[in-house]
Image: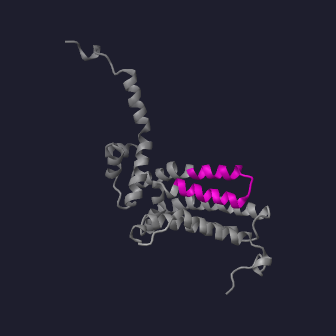
Amino acid sequence: MQPKSAQPSTTTPKGGRWRRRKHARPAEIVAAALKVFSERGFNATRLDDVARSAGVSKGTVYLYFENKEALFRAVVAEEVLPQIARVEKMVDAYSGDMAELLRQLVEQWWETVGESPLSGIPKLMMAEASNFPELACFYVDNVVRRVRRILVRVVERGIDDGQFRSCDPAYVARALLAPLVFSVVWRRSLEQFDSDPYDARTFLHVQLELTLHGLTRTAATTGASSDDGPRH
């Protein structure tokens, strides 16, 4: 019988496939975690669930991620932040009408977030923020504030170019974000129980056009000073 040392070793193609598979495991685990977190929420998700969804052992998950909190941070870093970076580059390169840019941003947001597993993350954070304050702070600092800054920049550019009237860009950014967040939270919670469903794209379009109408109205048509604040 031929000794083991003389037997053919693992072939290069097979070894290459194994190495590629091992290298891809963190990304596969993160993708599986996004799906499970979106469906079950943070607290109810177990790493066993993520491992099963990724087709790996629980020990393999721990090989790459210290705990569930670290895995969630990786989901945000790998799945959410690249989308924000892409939008930042888009805004930097854009030189046209700011109202049209806002329309494009809302449409792309719904395509990349609202209609994908990413839509589960805002609902998860709103539902469980008080139970996991460190994760909530991480999400607000790295996602919410960064998105708000993008919208503030667009509004400020519109004001500087004379496309929008004078206003508080920070509050306009919040007004733009509110229907986006509502849409994904509603879709993943109460929509299934509503006997009078609505089309999210139409809702977002109506909300955006109402906001743009307010941004582009002049003081002459409103009969008020452009920098008037709320009246009590």
Where residue 216 sits in the image (x, y, percent)?
74, 69
Residue 68 visible to the viewer: yes
Q: Number of numbered discs present?
A: 0
Q: Residue at x 77, y 77 (%)?
A: 221
* Residue 128 quadrant: bottom left
Looking at the figure, which quarter contains the N terminus?
Answer: top left
Give the magenta-colored segment's residue range: 83-112
Give 35 or 212, whichever is nearer the viewer.
Answer: 212
Residue displayed at 43% across by 32% down: 20
As rendered, which of 6 and 104 lies closer to the eye?
104
Residue under the image location 28 percent in, 15 percent down? 7
- Which image quarter holds the C terminus? bottom right
Would you say 210 lies left or right of 185 here?
right
- Place of residue 127 in the rendered image (x, y in percent of width and height, measured from the top left): 44, 67
Q: Magenta includes 86?
A: yes
Q: Position of residue 225 (x, y in %)?
A: 78, 79
> Is residue 81 shown above or below 223?
above
Q: Is residue 10 above or below residue 1?
A: below
